[in-house]
Image: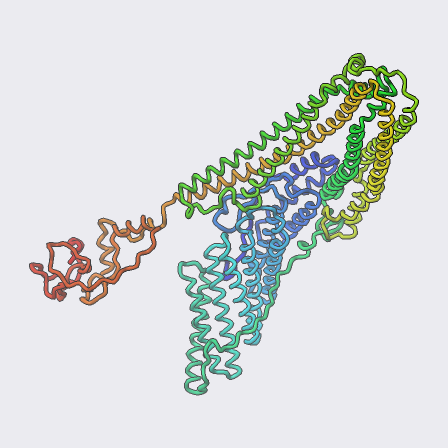
Amino acid sequence: MTTASVLSLPFRKSTHISISDAIRQYISKKYDQHPEMFRNDLEVIDNLRRDAVNVREAHPSGVKKLQTYAGQLVWMGGKFPIDIGADFSWYPALGYHTERPLVQNNLKYELMNVLYNLAALYSQLALSSNRSSTDGLKTAASWFSHAAGVLTHVKTQILPELRMDNPPDDMDESTLESLIQLLLAQSQECFWQKAVTDKYKDASIAKLAARVSDLYNLAGEAAMQSEAISSSWIHHMSAKHHHFAAAAQYRAACDCLERRKYGEEVARLADAVSCVNEGLKESKGSYLSKIVTEELTGLKKRVEEDLKRAERDNDVIYLQPVPPKSELKILDRANMAVARIPPQVANPYEYLGDHAEFGPALFSKLVPFAVHVAVSIYEERRDRLVNNNIIAELETMTEKLHSILSSLNLPGSLQALEKPLGLPGTLVQHADEIRQADALNRLQRGFADIEKLRSSDRGVFEEGKALLATEHEEDDRLRKKYGTQRWTRPESRADPSPNGGAKLWGQAAEIEGYFASSTSSDAIVRDKYDSVRDTLAILAGSDRGMLDYIPNSRVAEIPESLKPALGRLRGAYSDVLRLESRRRKRVEALRSKSRADDIKQEILAEAARLERTYPNTSIVPAHFEDFFEKRLDSLYETDLEAVDKENADQEKAVTDVERANREFEAQKRTAGDKGTREREAALQRLDNAYYKYKEIVNNVEVGRKFYNDLSRIVGQFRDQVRAWVNERRKDARSLEDELSMPPLSSLSINHTPQSPPAQAYQAQNSYFNQPPPQAQARQPLHSPAEAQIQSWAGDMPPQQPKPMPPVAPVANMGGMWNPEMGITFGQGSGSTTPQGGQQRGKPPVSGTWDPSGGIRFG
């Protein structure tokens, strides 16, 4: 908007949306609380948005509406995630796409637009102020400063947290910087105008004007980097820059006159004339408003009159040397305009409350979203600590223990001697457990589930990879079609954007590695199962089957010499079993303790304490780091210490078993092996199969969890690929349309109609009536044919004209035109031909060209 000599920001427009529906749906899905608890808050937030987006007039009542809605949005940012599920649609206010809305599921985007409209309202209030009075100028300057402050807050606080790859054109960093400097320049201009009205000293007014010029210059430089600032605004900023540079030098010259520095006065007035002339150049093309042009013209007239007077007085009376511009002292600056962020924008929390300006904070009884995130973070850390640092270590020790016992043929060697006939009691217990668990079918179902999950994950991943490959092929085809110099966008695999091709192809390679690793692990587990499947089938069968599998010992009694060693080995082995049983109970107790570890009430109390301690700070999960550390230490430090103790106990127990087993084996060899080897080996195979089954069950559960987690990863990967490919295709269509447009050079302005009207030529009589001078340099004349050649060859490098040697005049060649003849329209009565005389057989014609006579060459 342009009124008088200042600019104001237009409002951004939005479409109606029920934000309460998105909030209600989100609460029902993500929170433990019911949406009906917040019915009143949901109605209020819809009303606040409706009032805010309907602010369309420059009235002070709109300030509170926009500030209140913005303050509640800031508060809600601590309760909900940025992508709450509401598609906010806003139309740009500046640029060339003001009829095309940008839709984003982004609370920060909504807040950014509301604050932009608040800045626009401040600028329009400044524009509507009565700037003909001192009070009105102070009010306008304050409004402009507040508008600049709001946009500064948007640029420094909101834009970095926007989480958008490409922010709106009229709210990117360059555009915001230009608008901030423009608003500050207009605020400073109000102070300058007040100083002129109040008749301040010329030196003070010069300092104020110089600063106005600087600010307009900064605004114009930033506007050149923006794609949304229009050419008329850029010309306006440039004209204002030169205008106030001239005004500053003029006031400095007046100060020089007062201080009797007449030579410097002349120099500054001359520089002021130069500056104002530069400003008037911006008026070409009707870019400037009428009043800006009139102000420049009036200033120029006044400065030129003073310059004539000063030069005359100095030349006749004072005779002081006029210094060059380079020797003039640079004018001091007096900055009065400051970007003032309204406290309601900078610290909205202070204005929320039952009796505060913005009213009570909405959804205050809803647990903050950061708290939910913090709970998730704590649970993840707790599970990682318990499962990886404690339970996994204990299970690794148990597997190592079983491996050592198996290498010692325990408990098979003991059972073969202690129970030479029938089935040992521990073996019967293991067989009952296998049967009750339906072990074979359970493992088969687990393998089938893993295969199904892997296939599903692989299908989703391959879909994403296929989209990447297709986009890569499309990009290569278009690059080959248009050439690398014209198809300028990055290649698919090298797109550096945050969620671009480089990142996605890297993710694809990483996920491929996951699949390769998991496939190898699955094969290892399968081989492990195949190695014990037949033995597990015997355990899962009947007791008669096991009796048939296990041969009876031919020795019915234990030799007396072997009994002491057997007793010591049995005691050491029983210690190992007690150690393993105690460890198993510790693991189960730890898992129960972890499941019962509910942190919600404690973390809510901690969040309330943080809100009371830091009322102006949004709660984020990082605030709970100390709380997490203290709680994990207090609950699980003893369990972590127990791991080391378990390891020491196991080392001692294994040492005792190995020593007892060596003594037992030595005594057994002395007594002689009398038919116990086959029974010992069979019992050991069955015992090993039982523990291998337990290990495989654990492997299957780990695999199932892995593929469930991987499904989320590949799903996110596919969705990101879809979004990126759609964006790339949209960009490709736009770039294709741009490259398919005819070049501007084909829109030739040199084309001449075949039958031009006589009036068009008669308007050029002053040119056509002049006889061509004989020694005149040849001018580059373009015929329509030449113009067409230039249009399709617009991409060729320009050819420099080569010097031509002088060519002697030639005689008339039967009407054939030679370029050295030039173009002559008719012949005046006194003109001559290139040969120096009249054309033979042609009577002289008058100086007025007759269209019916055509154009004669030569």
Query: In the shown orientation, is residue 821 left or right of residue 546?
Result: left
Q: Position of residue 637 (x, y in %)?
A: 83, 43
Query: How many marks can you see?
Result: 0
Position in image of residue 98 (x %, y %): 50, 47
For the C terminus, the quadrant is: bottom left
**Does the image show residue 318?**
yes
Residue at figure coordinates x 69%, y 34% from the top left: 29
Closer to us: 330 or 380: 380
Where is residue 6 shown, x and y percent of the image? 52, 60
The residue that appears at 61% across and 51% down in the rendered structure is: 160
Q: Is residue 366 visible?
A: no
Q: Give the residue displayed 53% in from the left and 43% down from the top.
A: 101
Taking 360 as reference, is 465 above or below it? Answer: above
The residue positioned 72% from the left and 44% from the top of the image is 370
Which sits in the foreground, 750 or 356? 750
Pick the residue in front: 264 or 549.
549
Q: How is the image coloured?
A: rainbow
Residue 183 screen position, x and y as percent: 56, 60
Of all residues, the one furthest to the left in this rendering is 841
Q: Is residue 438 above or below residue 165?
A: above
**Quarter holding residue 703:** top right
